[in-house]
């Protein structure tokens, strides 16, 4: 091979490679925008399923310009740490339970923890999808957080290693709660001893007897295997547990407008996934706990449930100054709840 012939071939290869690069400039110039989405529950829960769906839809709608990495089960951060990580920008997206926002200084979110304030999902959605819900999310802005949506889990049951039928049964029982002063007051109203623990620490605390019982929707109780270490469960449906989907505000505001629009669309669709799954997932989880045969499931009689309600509704008044009279009245107006009529 002559020198000039080899040179020609080399030049041709070089030109071909340069042309290929010119054809796909974005592949080299634009790495995808990464969203780290951290959460504390199992993938097989309403929140877990909605987060996975969001990741898929966000990638589809943005045609790969956004990549969402979902970290379930407190893999990356536990409850308190994840909110700090969001504010610092170490993660971009979370969906903490509404009970976990007060430590940020937005105590009004604890209104969702008030026992018996919502009769069902319809009551709840009138609040989350109306002006009260929007107003609460807007309060997060000054904390460097943008609230995008509410996702349902469901209504909570109580569990313990002893039967919980009458109000007196709760007396002296050590109960794990989320970091909410309303939940603390709820347990104290029953004579129980509340203890705040991270979600990820609950199973072990129940197993080792650090606490005797807890409250959660069945989907969490089942997927975290808490039922393995709880002999009794009472289907009280005494309170609601749901989530606010939140993003780091600086990150969100800095996104190109078209991408923000596509992600908003993905969130709207994911919200439907969470809410469509919530009721069925919790029913199914309860059936699975029953089938596992380790936990006795008790449904309180109407009289027992009324006694529980009478013991717990005074918590509303007790906590009014913390959550704000205006927020509480606005919710009563939406739902028709009247504490004087029990
Ligand atoms: C809990 O800590 O019990 C829940 O908030 C967990 C969750 O995210 O559903």
Image (cartoon, helix red, strand yellow):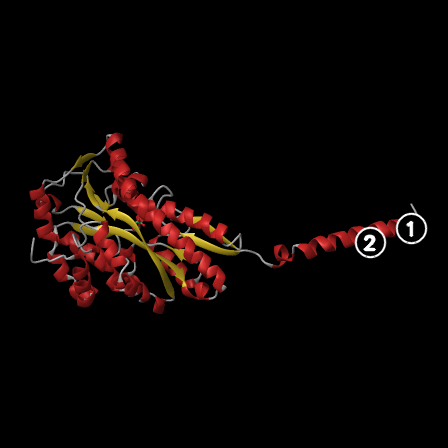
Residue 220, position as x, y percentages in the image: 29, 43
Residue 198, relative to residue 209: is it above or below? below
| 102 sits left or right of 172 in the view | right
Residue 129 visible in the picture: yes
Mark 1 lies on residue: 3
Residue 73 visible in the picture: no
Residue at the spot 38% in from the left edge and 45% down from the top edge:
49
Residue 11 disc label:
2
Q: Ligand 1 closer than 8 Å to the CB at disc 1?
A: no
Q: How crowded is mark 1: few (under 14 residues within 10 Å), some or many (20 or more)?
A: few
Q: Quadrant of residue 338?
A: bottom left
Residue 299, position as x, y percentages in the image: 15, 38
Q: In which quarter of the image is residue 325?
A: bottom left
Residue 87 disc label:
none
Farthest residue to the right: give it: 2
Where's the N terminus, which quadrant? top right
Residue at the spot 21% in from the left edge and 55% down from the top edge:
113
Q: What element carries label 1?
A: helix
| 151 sits left or right of 13 in the view | left
> In this rendering, which labeled residue sits more in front, label 2 or label 1?
2
């Amino acid at each position: 091979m002559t020198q000039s012939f080899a040179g020609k071939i080399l030049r041709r290869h070089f030109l071909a490679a340069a042309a290929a690069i010119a054809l796909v400039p974005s592949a080299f110039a634009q790495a995808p925008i990464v969203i780290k989405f951290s959460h504390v529950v199992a993938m097989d829960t309403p929140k877990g399923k909605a987060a996975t769906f969001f990741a898929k839809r966000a990638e589809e709608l943005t045609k790969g310009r956004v990549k969402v990495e979902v970290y379930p089960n407190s893999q990356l951060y536990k409850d308190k740490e994840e909110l700090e990580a969001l504010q610092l920008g170490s993660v971009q997206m979370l969906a903490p339970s509404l009970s976990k926002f007060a430590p940020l200084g937005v105590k009004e979110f604890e209104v969702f923890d008030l026992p018996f304030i919502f009769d069902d999902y319809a009551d709840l959605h009138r609040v989350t999808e109306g002006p009260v819900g929007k107003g609460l999310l807007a309060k997060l802005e000054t904390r460097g957080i943008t609230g995008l949506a509410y996702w349902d889990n469901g209504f909570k049951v109580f569990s313990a290693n002893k039967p919980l039928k009458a109000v007196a049964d709760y007396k002296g029982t050590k109960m794990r709660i989320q970091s909410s002063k309303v939940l603390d007051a709820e347990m104290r109203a029953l004579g129980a001893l509340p203890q705040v623990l991270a979600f990820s620490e609950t199973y072990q605390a129940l197993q080792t007897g650090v606490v005797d019982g807890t409250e959660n929707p069945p989907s969490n109780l089942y997927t975290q295997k808490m039922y393995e270490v709880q002999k009794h469960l009472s289907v009280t449906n005494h309170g609601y547990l749901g989530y606010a989907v939140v993003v780091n505000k600086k990150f969100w505001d800095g996104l190109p407008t078209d991408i923000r629009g596509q992600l908003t669309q993905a969130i709207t669709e994911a919200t439907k996934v969470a809410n469509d799954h919530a009721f069925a997932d919790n029913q199914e989880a309860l059936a699975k706990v029953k089938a596992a045969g380790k936990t006795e499931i008790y449904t309180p009689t109407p009289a027992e449930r009324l006694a529980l309600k009478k013991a717990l509704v005074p918590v509303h008044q007790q906590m009014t100054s913390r959550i704000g009279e205006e927020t509480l009245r606005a919710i009563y107006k939406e739902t028709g709840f009247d504490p004087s009529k029990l």
